Image (cartoon, grey):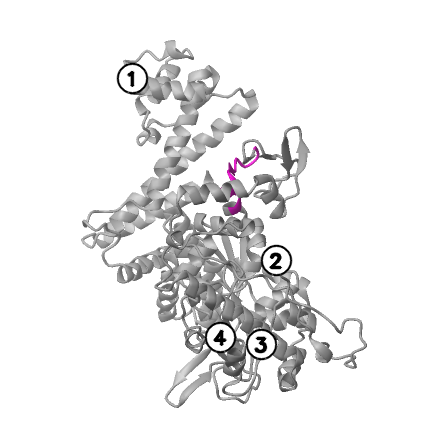
Amino acid sequence: MMLKRISYGANERFFGGNRNGNDPQHTASIITNPTPTFSMSGFLGPDIIAQIREANDIVDVVQWLNVPLKKAGTNYRALCPFHKEKTPSFNVSRQRQSFHCFGCDAGGDVFKFVMLREGLDFPAAARRLAERASVPIPESQAGPSSGASRDQRERLYEIHCKTRDWFHLNLMRSRQAETARDYLRQRGFTSTTAKEFQLGYALPSWDSLQKWGRAQGMDSSLLQESGLVVAGERGCYDRFRDRLMIPISDEAGRVAGFSGRILSSESKEAKYVNSPETPIFKKGRILFGLDRSKRDLLERKTAVMCEGQLDWIRCFTAGIRNVIAPQGTALTEEQARLLKRYVDEVVLCFDSDPAGQKATWRNAETLIAAGLSVKAARIPEGEDPDSFIRTTGAEAFQACLEQAVDVFEYKAQFLARTLNMREPRAHLRAVEEMTPLLALVDNEPQRQRLIQNLSDILKMDTAAFLHEFERQRQRLHPRGIETKEGTPQMTSSENAGQSQVMGFGDYLLRLSLTDEAAARMLAQNSEDAWFDGYHLRRMILHVIRRTREGAWKAGWNGLDLDLNDADREQIGRLLTHSMPMTRQSMAVGLHEAVCGLRRACLQERCQEISRLLQEKTLSDHDRLQHQRELLDLARQIRQI
């Protein structure tokens, strides 16, 4: 691999200090990654997959991705990179070219490891491994590229990579960049930071980039397609002029676009100018900083989301590395789904001004809809992450993140502060503001708990809040949830409820079939109705009934029922998977399973009532009765 050395010259230490060229830190260099020689987004043939697999030994790849391995017999062992543990349970086999963790049960081949470790889908993982081993991908198998050829996209990546270096050299060496250097100095950014994140400067001339590009042999039409040059009525001109330049990289770390910030507060131009949509830059699909933060995101399973690129840089350099930023304040559904591959929870950390608050609510809705848990951090008024860290330090900011509250509670507290809750109109406004968020919660018991908590914060009657919420939700979703055929669709929470009943039922039946003491505990602490949705209901009720009669004998002989082949196969499967347990662990497991089964049944009833509340013909009296039952069910669930 060729390494490109770039000397910054005598202006390297532009943030203050010696500029006479004698400082030992005067000379620096950039190692630029070579532009990828191919792109891949579609299907790959089995021959190419086999070549990539053969070229990437799994032991080497695991260590390449910063998991130190120790030899253990014929295999290798390490602390699992996918869950926290003190004793190594992560095993890698060179002979089988596979990995397996006995702690979290993660396992697979070299492709699967890269997918889990880097948070990539299969094509991206295959591309990463192909690049590592210099395995070329034939053009015919590179897949569709949004209308652009593979060669065209690679040339665009190359142009952006070279332009990033040119912008950076301008910042470090050009006299015209003194204003940009002063701006960074005032913001507390050092030359080390500028080098690490390749910050740059776009010269003020209307055609500086074009002249430089021609000298580099770049095609003028490709410069226009890259968005760096704009075709106007009087000719072409540079899109970015007299701006601090921040490179934007895609998930794989390739420069795909730029964001340019004005340097004068008196300028009437837009504060930020971003690259337009191009074959390699889709603003709504890229999360700023993801290429650097993804390892920390995967390990912590929590993302800190700030608004701007400079906020991101400040957080990252302060040691808060599980941080990302959307391209603008409005998060897209694609960005939320991308983030869901890495984390389970997001802490929103936007400005405390009205625009920042609106961005918090809007992005929270998008994230919750994607299945993520959302919190919001309270930043003092007039501060953003950058200024807060500069004035109070990284530890204070970290404490602020740790004290982040659930976004529902955060919004309710905001409304309680800004609305006069003694007025009835404020009650309606508060519920109206909360409804878009609450409507996204498909778990009915969770929603009922939230409504109770929010009612307390807003000092409202819970039944009144629930009634107004149902009215507002009807306005948002007047038809409810339907399939294309118009029939009711089973929600994810209903599917989850059925899965829970099956899991708990299988566990309890297995224990009862093999241990008479377990059967007695089950018979004393269960109700027959809890098993209505269980696929082996007839068998488990038979065990319970015989146990209550004092006639149950563990094993096949006690199960004196007329069983068909399918029933016998399922019972055999349960008995095959039985595990030896101590009396105490059995009692604990049985108690948890009984509680889980009861909880699942109560949740199912909550969903049934929720469906009834969707009916427009429901009388006010019946609606109120159902709402009261929901609250009672929520109370019972909390007490389990």
Q: Which residue is mark 1?
A: 565
Instruction: Give the structural element (helix, strand or loop) at label 1.
Output: helix
- Which is more toward the observer, 328 or 220? 220
> What is the distance, in whole Å, between disc 1 and disc 2 at their CAs?
64 Å
Q: Quadrant of residue 423?
A: bottom left
- Report the residue that reaches farthest toward the top: 557
Instruction: Give the structural element (helix, strand or loop) at label 3.
Output: helix
Q: Nearer the viewer, mark 3 or mark 1?
A: 3
Q: Nearer the viewer, mark 1 or mark 2?
A: 2
Residue 526: give x, y in percent of width and height: 40, 27
Q: Which residue is mark 4?
A: 218
> What is the distance, in whole Å, between disc 4 and disc 2 at their CAs?
23 Å
> What is the distance, in whole Å, between disc 3 and disc 2 at their CAs?
23 Å
Q: Specify the amino acid type for callout 3.
A: Phe
Q: Which residue is mark 3?
A: 167
Q: Which mark is residue 454?
A: none
Among numbered discs 4 and 2, the one appearing first in the sequence: 2
Residue 542: give x, y in percent of width and height: 33, 18
Give the extent of the magenta segment: 102-114
> What is the distance, in whole Å, between disc 3 and disc 4 at their CAs?
16 Å
Q: Which mark is residue 1?
A: 2
Do the residues under discs 4 and 2 have CB atoms within 8 angstroms?
no
Q: Specify the amino acid type for callout 2.
A: Met
Badge 1 crowding class, 10 Å Cα cut-off, few under 14, some 14 to 19, many 20 or more, is few
Left or right of residue 138: residue 181: right
Do the residues under discs 3 and 4 have CB atoms within 8 angstroms?
no
Left or right of residue 167: residue 364: left
